[in-house]
Image: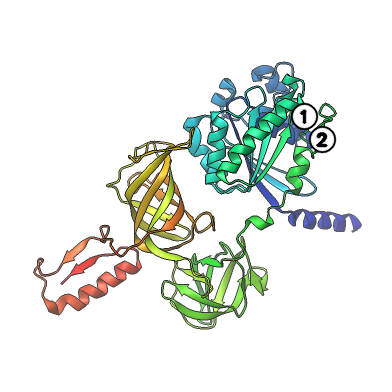
């Protein structure tokens, strides 16, 4: 009985650990996969059969000489093992006594920029690796820019392969100073530098005796303790409605995930876009009712008043309302093999809302290697720049810098159903001078429709608008 209680206590404590999502990025052969493999190995998170397979594969296809090739723990594709590089994003999960981790090992090649964007979209922290023999190179600048674009607040600079320069302190400090200049330029404040040898394990899980001049923690100690709770937006309450739950006549609740902010029972709220007000009656979960809800909880909210709210609409506090509009400027990362076509109408998915959208204007393209702005022209695969987006239906959004959850969206090709692009909203644009160039026009007189049918047609058009298809009527 005592053993059962101990197991239950252990499982309960494990469930309460917080989760750190991190990505690794760096140039080819900087040691990203080796570093993560070393973390897993030295933290005793590998099973015996995994270790046996790792030792066997290291002798057969490894690239680390007589050493165990820890990169093989992550480079799972055959092409990755043959070339000794990372091509696709590899995710690995492990846990320590203090925290759970999900690691995204992202490719270093420029042509796999979209893979890095995918891996970093949910990350709290980024580990940027550099080879101490080459220092901060173009790839390093590109990856750091992408990390800043994604809004990742914590960066670790892992100066790897220090064993090849005899753990020279000056080499490390020079690289750290140069990198700090770059992050200051990009406005990144939280940067921590580590001198490492991923292959030998120096300063990875335990402090190394070969760097007596380094007084900071080992990498794993830092990852276990870096504070990430403040990264979430607990100020701006945003609740995109995913589903309306009506199991019986006595219950009507709005299901969804709290994107940001905190809501309490009895809080006054407003529904967008109707602007109807009410108060929170209850916050319901599978395990019972709560007095408050916060991200990333999924809950069902009931209101004290009967308000017509549908999927795609949003519940917020009345004194803190997001931008409401159809026209905005965004940073766009093109992820489709097909080049950008500004004449095409895409599906835009923003939280639980889906609408049609077009790229109204291309402002510029960013050279991610030099960070220079170039003249705007249609994007090719992996290109990044600023564009103006125009949607058919009103959206409720914040700037990405303020709120990652309500400031991001994806564009979907309506023909292939591929994800064409991902966007990070910068700011809204004035719609007063915009023509509704997305909405088809119904010229009733030209079609020979008499006035006696106008009312019936307007009713149909309003219902189509509720479903996301807006039509402009000319009487």
- Where residue 286 appears, x then y in whole percent? 64, 68
**N-term-proximal mark, 1 vs 2:** 1
The residue pinned by badge 1 equals 201
The residue pinned by badge 2 equals 206
Residue in the picture at 61% in, 24% down? 29
Q: CA distance from mark 1 to mark 2?
A: 8 Å
Using residue 297 as the reference point, say whether residue 415 is left or right of it: left
Using residue 182 as the reference point, say whether residue 196 is left or right of it: right
- Where residue 263 appears, x then y in whole percent? 60, 71
Quick check: 149 above or below 434? above
Residue 52 in view here: no
4 or 159: nearer the eye?
Answer: 159
Q: Specify the color scheme.
A: rainbow
Q: Which quadrant holds residue 313?
A: bottom left
Quick check: 350 above or below 343? below
Numbered mark located on residue 138 in the image: none
Residue in the picture at 57% in, 20% down? 82
Using residue 300 as the reference point, say whether residue 69 is left or right of it: right
Image quarter hosting the N terminus: bottom right
Cβ atoms at labels 1 and 2 below 8 Å apart: yes
Quick check: 299 above or below 23? below
25 or 210: nearer the eye?
Answer: 210
Give the structural element (helix, strand or loop) at label 1. Answer: loop
399 or 206: nearer the eye?
Answer: 399
- Where residue 398 appears, x then y in whole percent? 49, 60
Residue 283 in view here: yes
């Amino acid at each position: 009985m005592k053993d059962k209680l101990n197991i239950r206590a252990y499982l309960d404590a494990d469930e309460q650990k917080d989760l750190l999502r991190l990505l690794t990025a760096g140039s080819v052969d900087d040691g990203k996969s080796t570093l993560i493999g070393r973390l897993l190995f030295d933290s005793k998170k590998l099973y015996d059969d995994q270790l046996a397979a790792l030792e066997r594969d290291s002798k057969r296809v490894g690239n680390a000489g007589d050493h165990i090739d820890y990169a093989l723990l992550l480079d799972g594709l055959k092409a990755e093992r043959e070339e000794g590089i990372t091509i696709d994003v590899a995710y690995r999960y492990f846990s320590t006594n203090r925290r759970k981790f999900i690691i995204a090992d992202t490719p270093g090649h420029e042509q796999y920029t979209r893979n890095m964007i995918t891996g970093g979209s949910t990350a709290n922290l980024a580990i940027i690796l550099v080879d101490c023999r080459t220092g901060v190179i173009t790839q390093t600048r590109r990856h750091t820019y992408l990390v800043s674009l994604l809004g990742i607040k914590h960066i670790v600079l892992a100066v790897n392969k220090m064993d090849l320069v005899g753990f020279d302190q000056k080499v490390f400090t020079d690289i750290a100073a140069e990198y700090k200049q770059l992050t200051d330029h990009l406005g990144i404040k939280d940067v921590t530098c580590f001198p490492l040898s991923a292959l030998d394990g120096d300063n990875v899980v335990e402090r190394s005796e070969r760097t007596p001049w380094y007084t900071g923690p080992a990498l794993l100690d830092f990852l276990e303790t870096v504070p990430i709770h403040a990264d979430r937006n607990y100020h701006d309450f945003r609740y995109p409605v995913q589903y309306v739950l009506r199991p019986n006549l006595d219950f009507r609740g709005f299901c969804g995930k709290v994107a940001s902010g905190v809501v309490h029972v009895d809080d006054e709220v407003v529904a967008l876009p109707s602007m109807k007000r009410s108060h929170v009656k209850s916050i319901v979960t599978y395990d019972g009712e709560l007095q408050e809800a916060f991200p990333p909880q999924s809950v069902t909210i009931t209101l004290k008043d009967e308000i017509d709210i549908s999927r795609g609409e949003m519940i917020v506090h009345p004194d803190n309302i997001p931008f409401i509009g159809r026209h905005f400027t965004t940073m766009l990362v093109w992820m489709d093999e097909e080049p950008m076509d500004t004449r095409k109408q895409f599906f835009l998915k923003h939280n639980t809302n889906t609408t049609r959208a077009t790229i109204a204007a291309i402002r510029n393209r960013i050279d991610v290697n030099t960070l220079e702005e170039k003249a705007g022209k249609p994007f090719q695969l992996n290109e990044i720049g600023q564009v103006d987006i125009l949607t058919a239906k009103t959206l409720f959004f914040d700037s990405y810098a303020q709120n990652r959850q309500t400031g991001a969206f994806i564009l979907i090709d309506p023909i292939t159903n591929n994800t064409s692009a991902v966007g990070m909203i910068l700011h809204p644009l004035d719609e007063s001078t915009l023509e509704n160039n997305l909405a088809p026009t119904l010229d009733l007189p030209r079609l020979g429709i008499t006035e006696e049918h106008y009312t019936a047609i307007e009713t149909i058009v309003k219902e189509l608008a509720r479903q996301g298809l807006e039509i402009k009527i000319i009487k």
